[in-house]
Image (cartoon, grey):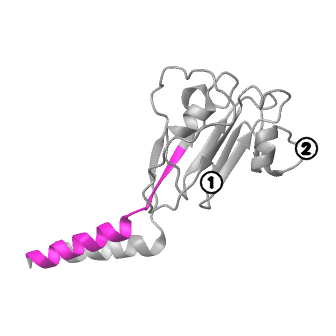
């Protein structure tokens, strides 16, 4: 009987691995504003498919453009724009394992440092990445703020039911 419990606990752990998504407030307490070091901020976290970026800013003072790498490097938002966000509380789900580039397209903000890129990995991969050098020198980072990264537990349909069944079996053993 004890071996069956261990087997079912292992089964539950395997199915739940990678079922946690995180919500990252871009810039932490400084939010999406001038003066924040977004290159440093983006290197503090490991981003996975299913995570969400939250851009908080005063509507009209900033915006968020998801752009191509070339547009990120040039800070010219007239081409290479994949998506635009202007609500002041933009939530962007990272739904693919790829590199994402973001800029503020308000005059001079991108060149002033309101840009960053991230490399999003599959949810169940080991997300250890070495620091990626930025293309331009960045000012020294501010003192590290308390993390504003919240964890949300996400269960897709099948893993929830398998977990429920496994726990029910464990209770009967």
Q: Is residue 173 left or right of residue 77?
A: left
Position in image of residue 3 (x %, y %): 12, 77
Tell me if residue 86 can be seen. no
Between 67 and 74, the one lying in front of the other is 74
* Secondary structure of residue under mark 1: strand
Q: Is residue 3 above or below residue 139?
A: below
For disc 2, the marked residue is: 78
* Secondary structure of residue under mark 2: loop
Q: Is residue 61 left or right of residue 90?
A: right
Between discs 1 and 2, the one toward the N terminus = 2
Q: Is residue 77 above or below residue 136?
A: below
User: Residue placed at 83% from the left, 26% from the top?
Assistant: 108
Position in image of residue 116 (x %, y %): 66, 39
Q: Is residue 30 above or below residue 47?
A: above
The stretch in magenta equals 2-23
Q: Is residue 89 magenta?
A: no
Between 173 and 119, the one lying in front of the other is 119
- Helix, strand or loop for the magenta stretch, by majority: helix
- Mark 1 or 2: the one toward you: 2
For disc 1, the marked residue is: 93
Quarter occupied by the C terminus? bottom left
Q: Is residue 25 left or right of residue 80?
A: left
Tell me if residue 99 can be seen. yes
User: Residue placed at 78% from the left, 29% from the top?
Assistant: 111
User: Residue placed at 53% from the left, 46% from the top?
Assistant: 23
Position in image of residue 115 (x %, y %): 70, 36
């Amino acid at each position: 009987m004890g071996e069956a419990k261990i087997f079912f606990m292992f089964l539950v752990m395997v199915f739940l691995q990678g079922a946690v998504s995180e919500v990252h407030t871009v810039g932490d307490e400084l939010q999406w504003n001038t003066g924040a070091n977004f290159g440093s901020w983006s290197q503090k976290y490991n981003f996975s498919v299913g995570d969400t970026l939250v851009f908080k800013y005063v509507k009209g003072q900033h915006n968020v453009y998801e752009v191509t790498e070339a547009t990120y490097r040039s800070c010219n938002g007239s081409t290479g724009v994949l998506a635009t966000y202007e609500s002041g509380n933009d939530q962007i789900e990272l739904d693919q394992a790829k590199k994402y580039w973001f800029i503020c397209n308000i005059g001079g903000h991108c060149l002033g440092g309101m840009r960053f890129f991230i490399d999003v990995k599959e949810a169940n991969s080991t997300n250890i990445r070495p620091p990626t050098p930025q293309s331009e020198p960045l000012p020294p980072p501010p003192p590290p703020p308390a993390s504003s990264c919240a964890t949300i537990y996400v269960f897709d349909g099948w893993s929830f039911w398998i977990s429920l069944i496994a726990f029910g079996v464990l209770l009967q053993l």
